[in-house]
Image: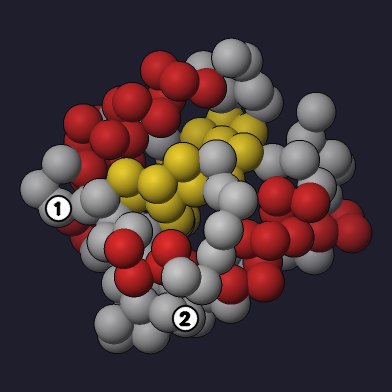
């Protein structure tokens, strides 16, 4: 499967359902899916399953983030792969696996201004 953009989220400190709660509201994940982005979770995914369904992938986090992010890149072969996560160690993992690291506070954009993923 080939896709243009994959957006992968950590849970703790990133999403509002994590502990600690993060700044990203769950509605943004649903909206990204509606716009045909490939969206999923790598990190403590059990916490998010009851809140969000219909994502493209769910993988547990520590200590297997490198392995799981690598699987996501292999599965979707994206032109752009983003990992939205809250720790400095997440940045190193993202870069090691070919993802662009995005801090949750910086993951702010208006979907109306983003070209649709195809």
Eyeballing the image, is 98 above or below 108?
above
Q: Residue at x 81, y 59 (%)?
A: 111
**Furthest-left residue in this view:** 63
Depth check, front residue: 53 or 86: 53
Residue 14 visible, this orientation: yes
Residue 86 appears left or right of 25 = left
Depth check, front residue: 17 or 14: 17
Residue 21 appears left or right of 2 = left
User: Percent x, y for residue 97?
Assistant: 30, 29
Residue for badge 1: 62
Q: Quadrant of residue 3?
A: top right
Eyeballing the image, is 33 above or below 20?
above
Residue for badge 2: 16
User: Percent x, y for residue 89?
Assistant: 18, 55
Residue 4 appears left or right of 44 = right
Q: Which mark is residue 94?
A: none
The earlier-in-sequence mark between 2 and 1 is 2
Q: Quadrant of the C terminus?
A: top right
Residue 16 appears left or right of 3 = left
Colour scheme shown: secondary structure
Where disc 2 sits, the SS reads loop
Pointers 2 and 1 in contact (CB under 8 A)?
A: no
Residue 85 visible, this orientation: no
User: Percent x, y for residue 29?
Assistant: 62, 60
Eyeballing the image, is 91 above or below 105?
above
Which class describes the residues within 10 Å of circle 2: few (<14), some (14-19), or many (20+)? some
Q: Residue at x 80, y 47 (%)?
A: 35
Q: Quadrant of the N terminus?
A: top right
Q: Residue at x 38, y 85 (%)?
A: 21
User: Percent x, y for residue 49?
Assistant: 43, 63
């Amino acid at each position: 499967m080939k896709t243009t953009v994959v957006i992968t989220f950590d849970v703790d400190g990133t999403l509002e359902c994590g502990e600690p709660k993060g700044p990203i509201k769950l509605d943004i994940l649903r909206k990204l899916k509606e716009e045909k982005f490939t969206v999923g979770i790598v990190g403590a995914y059990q916490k998010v399953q009851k809140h969000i369904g219909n994502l493209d992938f769910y993988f547990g986090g520590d200590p297997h983030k490198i392995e799981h992010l690598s699987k996501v890149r292999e599965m979707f072969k994206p032109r752009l792969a983003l990992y939205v996560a809250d720790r400095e160690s997440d940045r190193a993992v993202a870069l090691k696996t070919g993802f662009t690291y995005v801090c949750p506070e910086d993951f702010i954009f208006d979907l109306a201004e983003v070209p649709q993923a195809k």
